[in-house]
Image (tube, rainbow, N blue to C red):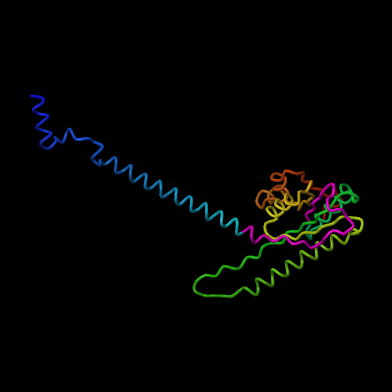
Amino acid sequence: MHRHAMGKWACGSVPRQLMLVGHVPTQNTKIQQQQLTSMSSTAAAAAAASQEQLASVKAAAANTIHEDVVSPHEDHPANPTRVIAIAVDSSKYAEHAFNWAINNIVRPETDQVVLMNVRPTVSLPAVYGALYVDFSKEFESIEEANKLESHNLLRAFASKLPAHKYNIRGVALRGDPRDELAYKVEDIKADMLVIGSRGLGPFKRAFLGSVSDYLVHHLTVPVIIPRPSEKNKAF
């Protein structure tokens, strides 16, 4: 009787309760398919964002500006024993750091001094609505003025040292001082960096951040921050 029943089902339709569940798309299966589709879309979006970020980094690297303004005298060796990087700007703190490094660290016979100055990136004003304003000439004018100021500053610091005695190089950078200095110090394989303290108070330091503090925590070489004496603090 059992065989007869099986034969009957084989010739006719199989009862619904005996159908394989895997062959019937249930509600749970549909939800799982939707989740997989959603996950695939999310992964694709993340991959696209990653590629876009990589392209942005490459574009930024292509626009990096590192200008050699001061070159060493031809009499100096191409491979110095040490490379001493000194960050300079127009402040008295930078001047103090420069003088301190020359008097206490630099060995003229064997060291190379690399002066570095970072000028800011010019930002164009935001324009709202349909109004179009061409700021290209103003942008180029400000960029050129900043470039000239940076180059003159590096030459002024370099001129304080006799070129025949000191192995001096001057490099002008452009962008965020923290990123540019960190990159260039590693790029020139500097043995140390000397940078002035801008004298920020605790509140301003916490709010604005400090270039020197950033470099202390991110560079793998010593960062020296000469601080002025009490009588010279009133710069």
Q: Nearer the viewer, residue 199 or 30?
A: 30
Left or right of 175? Residue 199 is right
In percent of width and height, residue 151 lies at 78, 65
Left or right of 32? Residue 48 is right
Q: Nearer the viewer, residue 101 or 55?
A: 55
Location of residue 44 with respect to 66 vertically, above or below:
above
Q: Residue at x 80, y 53 (%)?
A: 86
In percent of width and height, residue 231 lies at 87, 51
Q: Is residue 71 magenta?
A: yes
Query: Where is the N terminus found, in terms of image quarters?
Result: top left
User: Number of labelled discs?
Assistant: 0
In percent of width and height, residue 105 lies at 86, 47
Location of residue 30 with respect to 180 vertically, above or below:
above
Left or right of 106? Residue 61 is left
Q: Quadrant of residue 71?
A: bottom right
Q: Residue at x 36, y 44 (%)?
A: 35
Left or right of 45? Residue 57 is right
Q: Residue at x 66, y 48 (%)?
A: 206
What span is colored magenta in the figure?
60-87
Query: Where is the C terminus found, in terms of image quarters?
Result: bottom right
